[in-house]
Amino acid sequence: LPVPQGDRCMHEFVASAKKLKDRTGITAMDIAKRLLDYGYHAPTVYFPLVVEEALMMEPTETESLETLNAFAEAIHAICAEAPELVKGAPHTTPVCRPDEVGAARKPILCWSGSDC
């Protein structure tokens, strides 16, 4: 994934999935959800707004080079996977991908043990 804002990064960096989306249909959100299957916390997506299909990664200062390389390898592997697999992620979490549009339009603002 290209880094659209130059090659200097501080403690965070932003990559763009725009070219991947144009080529395969895989979005930044799809990559973030698939990273959950690899055991990584999903990065911030679609921010900053000036970067199309933005993925903002913020590794902590204590991450080792080995861990950072493994994360980069996971991103690389996801980009090479079948789009259908990536778009259906996550596959290994207790809750798979929820209907986010439906949840936003018809929110259920209670939990199963309450008197809703």
Image (spheres, rainbow, N blue to C red):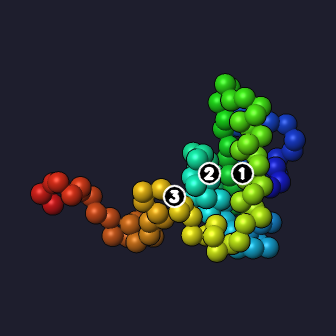
Q: Say whether residue 25 is left or right of residue 7.
A: left
Q: Say whether residue 4 is left or right of residue 86.
A: right
Q: Which amino acid, by three-letter code, is at mark 2?
A: Tyr
Across and down, in percent, residue 82 comes to 71, 71
Q: Residue at x 68, y 29 (%)?
A: 63
Residue 51 visible here: no
CB under 8 Å between discs 2 and 1: yes
SS for dot 3: loop
Across and down, in percent, residue 24 comes to 75, 73
CB under 8 Å between discs 3 and 2: no
Q: Work out whether mark 2 precedes mark 1 in sequence or the reverse, and give the earlier one.
A: 2
The Cα–Cα distance between marks 3 and 2, rounded to whole angstroms, is 9 Å
The Cα–Cα distance between marks 1 and 3, rounded to whole angstroms, is 15 Å
Q: Residue at x 48, y 56 (%)?
A: 93
Q: Which amino acid, by three-letter code, is at mark 3?
A: Thr
Q: Work out whether mark 3 precedes mark 2 in sequence or the reverse, and give the earlier one.
A: 2
> Looking at the image, is 17 positioned above or below residue 84?
above
SS for dot 2: loop
Q: Which amino acid, by three-letter code, is at mark 1?
A: Ala
Across and down, in percent, residue 58 comes to 66, 38
SS for dot 1: helix
Q: Residue at x 57, y 70 (%)?
A: 88
The number of callouts visible is 3
Q: Say whether residue 38 is left or right of residue 104.
A: right
Residue found at the far right of this picture = 7
Q: Name the residue under label 3.
A: 92
Q: Say whether residue 35 is left or right of residue 66.
A: left
Q: Mark 2 points at which residue?
A: 38
Q: Which residue is nearer to you in this view: 25 or 48?
A: 25
Q: Which residue is drawn at 46% across and 63% down?
A: 96
Q: Which residue is nearer to you in this view: 34 or 103?
A: 34
Number of the label disc, if any, that sits on residue 74: 1
